[in-house]
Amino acid sequence: MEDYANPKSLKAAFVLTLCSFLTSLAMISHSPLLSQPLSHFLLLLLLPLFFTSVASQCKNPPIIFNFGDSNSDTGGLVAGLGFPVNLPNGRTFFHRSTGRLSDGRLLIDFLCQSLNASFLSPYLDSLGGSRFTNGANFAVVGSSTLPKYVPFSLNIQLMQFLHFKARTLELVTAGFGNFITDEGLRNALYIIDIGQNDIADSFSKKMSYAQVTKRIPSVVLEIENAVKVLYNQGGRKFWIHNTGPLGCLPQKLSLVQKKDLDPIGCISDYNRAAGLFNEGLRRLCERMRSQLSGATIVYVDIYSIKYDLIANSSKYGFSSPLMACCGSGGPPYNYDIRVTCSQPGYQVCDEGSRYVNWDGIHYTEAANSIVASKVLSMAHSSPSIPFDFFCRN
């Protein structure tokens, strides 16, 4: 068994200490001892330093392949279908729309930065100029595990990866340089972040809670199949996210008429279903660790991170955690399915406003940065492996 904590214990301790400091700083944002504008300024100042400090430890960033949905789509929907994703999406960091459904960076972007790796290019982007030497992003908005063979379900993303691998190795064999080698593919990090749409779509089809939860084992099975396909292709390093609290999304809160709300105002059934999926996924990861010899499989509890952020939003310096920054309709949710973010008639909060939710479904860059710092702290990962464990030696 590898000692995950020791070779990089100083770095791991640094990450944990800095995460704790940032959390403590956020939690005094409403203290009379520190003005709110000043605390927000300090958070904005220190979070980039946090990611830079972690990134500086990774001299040889890993090749990364990502599979998922809109939570990690870095432009796949736009590249694949030509679907417009316009400003104000991307206004904060990129200052232009990149196809990401956020005002800035996503969790996957912060994770890449933490390893000193380039942002992942969408696999379908033919004009981006990338040779995908750092990996590729197969995630596309709206993706789910089921039904299969529907663009861009998880198994379609896997088929795209298999084609990518075959074509890349063909070019390497033919003598073309600067492509990922077979060794690079074996040592790559494979990230999976999918399942949210399977649950959400089931509820949107008016399925009962019992019917929705009955489908969950089939969803988990598809993720298991994906990991095993990648493992059989030589992959050994896996980073798997569970799904967030669906019942706290402004879109769901706005559209669901009859709803039982929990103490913080989220839809109980949606979150319970997400919890069942997450438990099934956690058990799957535990089981696969014993089945797949030599594999490192890390399960990351995104749900607990995001629920804490919403439940204690004011302590992190955020306001109106159940209301979208970009949308229409105003309080309590600022979401109207007829006038969504970037569509004619939308309204958007001031740049620099501290909102958790961006467009009713996706998170703001400010929220994603907090989520990323918590992920990198290892406090929500099983096993607790520092993310820079995946740096190439």
Image (spheres, rainbow, N blue to C red):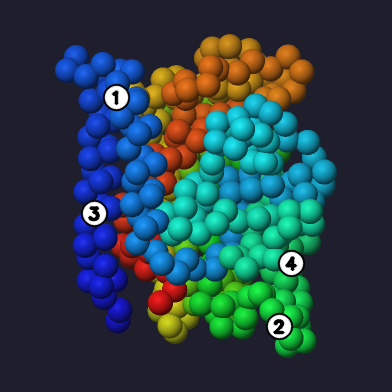
Q: CA distance from mark 1 to mark 4?
A: 45 Å
Q: Is residue 314 above or below residue 241?
A: above
Q: CA distance from mark 2 to mark 3?
A: 40 Å
Image position, residue 45 (x, y; %): 35, 34
What's under tag 3, amino acid-wise?
Phe
262 relative position to 81: left or right: left
Residue at which label 1 appears: 39
Task: Report the number of numbered marks.
Answer: 4
**Crowdedness near tag 3: few (<14), some (14–19) or many (≥20) residues, C-alpha within 10 Å:** some
**Crowdedness near tag 2: few (<14), some (14–19) or many (≥20) residues, C-alpha within 10 Å:** some
Q: Residue 216 appears in which quarter of the rendering?
A: bottom right
Image position, residue 201 (x, y; %): 67, 42
- Mark 3 or 4 closer to N-term? 3
Question: Which residue lies at the image location 59% right of the left edge and 60% below the top edge?
Answer: 66
In-front residue for pair 347/94:
94
Can residue 198 be seen at all in this image of the molecule?
no
- Mark 1 or 4 closer to N-term? 1
Tag 4 secondary structure: helix
Q: Tag on residue 172?
A: 2
The answer to whether marks 1 and 2 mark residues whose Cβ atoms lie closer than 8 Å is no
The answer to whether marks 2 and 3 mark residues whose Cβ atoms lie closer than 8 Å is no
What's under tag 4, amino acid-wise?
Gln
Residue at which label 4 appears: 160
Of discs 1 and 4, which sits in the foreground?
Answer: 1
What's under tag 2, amino acid-wise?
Val
In-front residue for pair 134/371:
134
Q: CA distance from mark 1 to mark 3?
A: 22 Å
Of discs 2 and 3, which sits in the foreground?
Answer: 2
